[in-house]
């Protein structure tokens, strides 16, 4: 049955209340994009549910009327994951912002999906506990967005990423059923692992309404160091030799020369401009062990030929060194009107090869690409500064990134290490998982979402046949 827009609006208001349905031109415009450049699409309505029951009722209505629903946290994803390509309802989950329980016996925290990542860090750290995943956007991003996107961060090397901390979920199917999977058990192999399936499902399978996450004891101390190298290959070798020496630092980040230059102009950190790369390394844990690891990494770095090694003596010094990495994207985005940040990932041993391939490709297509990222994870962020108004340049940028992903795959890597597929990478996914892989994923999608109403146009280029009432 096809309903009219105004009757859909009144039915939405009846579920969540008049104040929680927005559809002014300004608000529809504000929700027509996320942190991803170039892609846009305005929703018909932005709906702010506050209870799981309301989410269920909105989904039932949308499913009945075949209206696309786009779950959204803070909209900081870089894959076009919350763009309303087919209009419909943006389901803004930020009002689910309650920390329900910090369970010190089971070392778990139960939260609403709208809790801001950094707020969760603060809340658990106040109890001497630790939630390691720390995406660069953590002061804005939501836990629901982190989990649905499968976010990574700077502490992935030692502690793993978001997916490694999700124990249980409450979620609502697009057909309205409210379900739970997992819980507080650290061990649970009862049936298929639906928790893992929903992590990284990018809002295409279900809407997450509550999460139980694993915690660790807060490490007692932390130290930071920075290493400058004349050649990228030296930086890569330091990473490899450190790990081969059985030291797993909490963080091993790198910036290439072009990123360093831009960051220094932006943040005035006094970075050298005559080196090819810098590594930012952080170790945490028991104080003596941290000191020993930092000394050993410094020895390894000098032996490999680092031009300089600086160890922060105070936490403030450490934070100053880390500022270079944290300000990389902000610094780069000042250069040109459009900044495209990608996240090709390769086995750690291929890091130096991948960086030089990116340089070659940038030269070939005459585009400006700076690279930084998580060296310890082989997760690179080649970032292109361009101007979306210049169609000819954008074609070259597209061709350059297509070749970057091809090279990453050839080196045994992947098209995305942490930002997800969304719209941005959908066309590359078959190259990563194969046509049979796509078919299987689409069958899973159909089992969860028979009418294809949940976040259409994401992950898959081809979508099941859904109908949009407002067209
Ligand atoms: C400056 C900057 C730095 C960043 N650094 C990192 C980084 O270090 N590592 C990293 O991995 N990413 C990083 N990102 C990308 C982004 O911040 C992450 O993907 C983050 O997890 C998105 O969270 P969000 O709340 O903004 O989610 P949104 O962007 O709102 O949504 C992300 C996806 O999750 C879905 N979703 C959201 N909430 C729900 C829900 N409750 N139920 C079901 N689906 C839902 C959406 O439909 C969408 O597909 C960065 C982005 C920026 C702008």
Image (cartoon, rainbow, N blue to C red):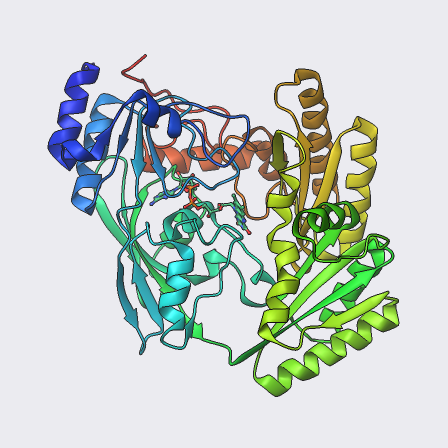
Count of numbered badges drawn on the protein = 0
Q: Is residue 28 left or right of residue 275?
A: left
| Res. 93 in view | yes
Q: Is residue 381 above or below residue 31?
A: below
Q: Residue furthest bottom?
A: 288
Q: Is residue 106 above or below residue 84?
A: below
Q: Camera-side residue: 439 or 418?
A: 418
Q: Camera-side residue: 213 or 181?
A: 213
Q: Residue at x 24, y 49 (%)?
A: 179
Point out the image quarter for the N terminus: top left
Q: Residue at x 44, y 66 (%)?
A: 131
What percent of the width, then of the height, locates residue 437? 53, 37
Q: Residue at x 62, y 40 (%)?
A: 342
Q: Quadrant of residue 453?
A: top left
Q: Is residue 369 left or right of residue 229?
A: left
What percent of the width, then of the height, locates residue 415? 62, 40
| Res. 1 in view | no
Point out the image quarter for the C terminus: top left
What percent of the width, then of the height, locates residue 116? 38, 54
What percent of the width, then of the height, locates residue 301? 81, 70
């Amino acid at each position: 049955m096809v309903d009219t827009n105004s009757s859909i609006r009144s039915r939405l208001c009846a579920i969540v209340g008049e104040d929680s349905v927005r559809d002014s031109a300004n608000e529809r415009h504000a929700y027509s994009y996320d942190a991803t450049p170039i892609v846009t699409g305005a929703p018909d309505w932005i709906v702010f549910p506050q209870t799981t029951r309301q989410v269920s009722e909105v989904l039932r209505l949308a499913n009945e009327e075949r209206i696309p629903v786009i779950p959204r946290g803070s909209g900081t994803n870089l894959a076009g994951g919350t763009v309303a390509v087919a209009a419909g309802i943006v389901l803004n989950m930020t009002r689910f912002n309650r920390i329900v329980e910090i369970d010190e016996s089971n070392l778990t925290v139960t939260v609403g999906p709208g809790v801001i990542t950094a707020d969760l860090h603060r809340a658990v750290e106040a109890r001497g506990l630790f939630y390691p995943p720390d995406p660069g956007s953590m002061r804005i991003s939501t836990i629901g967005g982190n989990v649905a996107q499968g976010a990574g961060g700077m502490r992935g090397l030692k502690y793993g990423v978001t997916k490694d901390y999700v124990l249980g979920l409450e979620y609502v199917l697009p057909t309205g059923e409210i379900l739970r999977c997992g819980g507080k058990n650290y061990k649970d192999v009862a049936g298929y692992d639906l928790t893992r399936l929903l992590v990284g499902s990018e809002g295409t399978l279900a809407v997450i309404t509550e999460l139980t996450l694993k915690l660790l004891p807060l490490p007692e101390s932390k130290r930071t160091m920075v290493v400058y190298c004349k050649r990228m290959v030296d930086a890569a070798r330091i990473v490899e030799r450190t790990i081969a020496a059985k030291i797993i630092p909490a963080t091993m980040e790198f910036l290439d020369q072009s990123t360093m230059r831009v960051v220094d102009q932006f943040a005035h950190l006094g970075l050298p401009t005559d080196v090819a790369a810098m590594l930012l390394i952080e170790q945490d844990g028991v104080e003596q062990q941290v000191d020993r690891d930092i000394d050993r990494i410094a020895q390894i770095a000098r032996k490999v030929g680092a031009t300089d090694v600086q160890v922060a003596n105070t936490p403030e010094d450490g934070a100053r060194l880390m500022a270079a990495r944290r300000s990389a994207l902000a610094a780069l985005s000042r250069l040109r009107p459009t900044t495209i940040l990608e996240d090709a990932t390769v086995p750690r041993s291929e890091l130096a090869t991948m960086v030089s391939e990116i340089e070659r490709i940038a030269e070939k297509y005459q585009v400006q690409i700076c690279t930084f990222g998580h060296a310890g994870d082989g997760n690179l962020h080649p970032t292109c500064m361009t101007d979306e108004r210049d169609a000819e340049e954008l074609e070259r940028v597209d061709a350059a990134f297509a070749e970057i992903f091809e090279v990453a795959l050839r080196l045994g890597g992947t098209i995305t290490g942490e930002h997800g597929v969304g719209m941005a990478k959908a066309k590359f996914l078959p190259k990563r998982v194969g046509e049979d892989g796509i078919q299987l994923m689409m069958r899973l999608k159909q089992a969860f979402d028979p009418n294809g109403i949940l976040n259409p146009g994401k992950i898959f280029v081809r979508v099941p046949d859904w109908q949009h009432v407002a067209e």
